[in-house]
Amino acid sequence: MLDLLAGDVVVPDRDDVAAAIGRNRAGQGVPLEVMLRTFRLGGQIVWEALLDRAREVPDVDFREIAAATWSVIDSMSSALVTSYRRTELEQVRRDERRRHGLIEDLLAGSAHDATFAARAARELNLPVHGGYLVVAVRGERPNVEMGTETALAALGIRSVWHDRVDTMVGLVSLEQRDSSAVLEQIRKRIRGRAAASPVVAGLAHIDTAHALATLALETLPVAAQGVVSLEERYPEALLLRSPDLTELMIARTLGPVLELPAKEREILLHTLAIWLAENCSAANAAPRLHCHRNTVINRLQRIASLLDRRLEGQRSYLELSLALAALDMGMSPTH
């Protein structure tokens, strides 16, 4: 400060000391408020010492001394704050990159190595062992409420949420909690369509859980909202796992109906889906289809005639249901 006041420091370098202090203290984790208070105290000590010496010198302009002194203090404080904030931001970015890398490695299966699992658990504040859910979310951003990690932590639920290119992924530790109760808390904070994996044992199986959560997510229509679990989508997941067989099944099961003009095709497929959903009861399906029971029966007979098979029977119900589910997922038959 005295060098600055005396003009012995070149102007472009005048704030190097304050900037260096800001960088060092930010790296040490010293709060910025503490540093600014230190500078104010230091400025006060210098100011009081200058006043004492100035009284010994005749014809001193105290206002000029005051203006110069506090200008130097203000300049150094500004340099300190700028350097501190820049260093703090760089640390945050480094931490975010490190966290991003750790989670990506977990999703890639690196936690099969016990040493890596222990390090990841320590740095992400997650347990190595115990039940885990992985939640995959898609939809218009933000598809998960801001502060979800903090909100869940307030309930004692440890988790990390990771933004990927097309998906938000949550790693949620159950720690003896019931998975359905934890999922209920997560559902309150999801805005897009989402799917949860089955419970897996520990970080070592996060990659498997992520793959299953993503598979369940792929079974959902684009317009879907909310969270489903893989257990609710097993038939659809099986269809996705065997796309070639699924396409052949669609063609074999519904091929002639799919070749009809669009309007008739949609009416017949919708009627078939509602009939199956109503336990194959034309009487129960009619109100949902807004038509008479006989109309439902006539449409079903038309389908049976096109397919050249009976619609009744356990195997028929299974094949027709699976084929309709595959169509709902956007899968098409192989001709």
Image (spheres, rainbow, N blue to C red):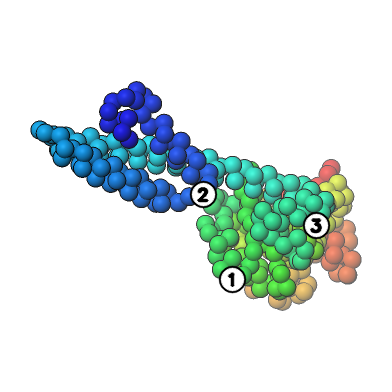
* Residue positioned 40% across, 37% down in the render: 18
Q: How crowded is mark 2: few (under 14 residues within 10 Å), some or many (20 or more)?
A: few
The quadrant in which residue 291 appears is bottom right
The quadrant in which residue 17 appears is top left
The answer to whether the residues at label 2 and label 1 have Cβ atoms under 8 Å apart is no
Amino acid type, label 3: His
Q: Which label is found at residue 98?
A: none
Residue 303 lies, in percent from the top left, at 79, 60
46 or 261, which is in the foreground? 46
**Image side of residue 161 versus residue 236, left or right:** left
Q: Name the residue under label 2.
A: 29
Q: How crowded is mark 3: few (under 14 residues within 10 Å), some or many (20 or more)?
A: many
- Disc 2 vs disc 3: which is toward the camera? 2
Up the image or down, 40 lies above or below 135; here it is above
* Residue positioned 64% across, 57% down in the render: 160
Q: How many discs appear?
A: 3
Work out whether residue 202 can be spotted. yes
Among numbered discs 2 and 3, the one appearing first in the sequence = 2
The answer to whether the residues at label 2 and label 3 have Cβ atoms under 8 Å apart is no
* Residue positioned 75% across, 60% down in the render: 128
Among numbered discs 3 and 1, the one appearing first in the sequence = 1
- Disc 2 vs disc 1: which is toward the camera? 2
Q: Name the residue under label 3.
A: 205
Amino acid type, label 2: Gly
Q: Mark 1 points at which residue?
A: 155
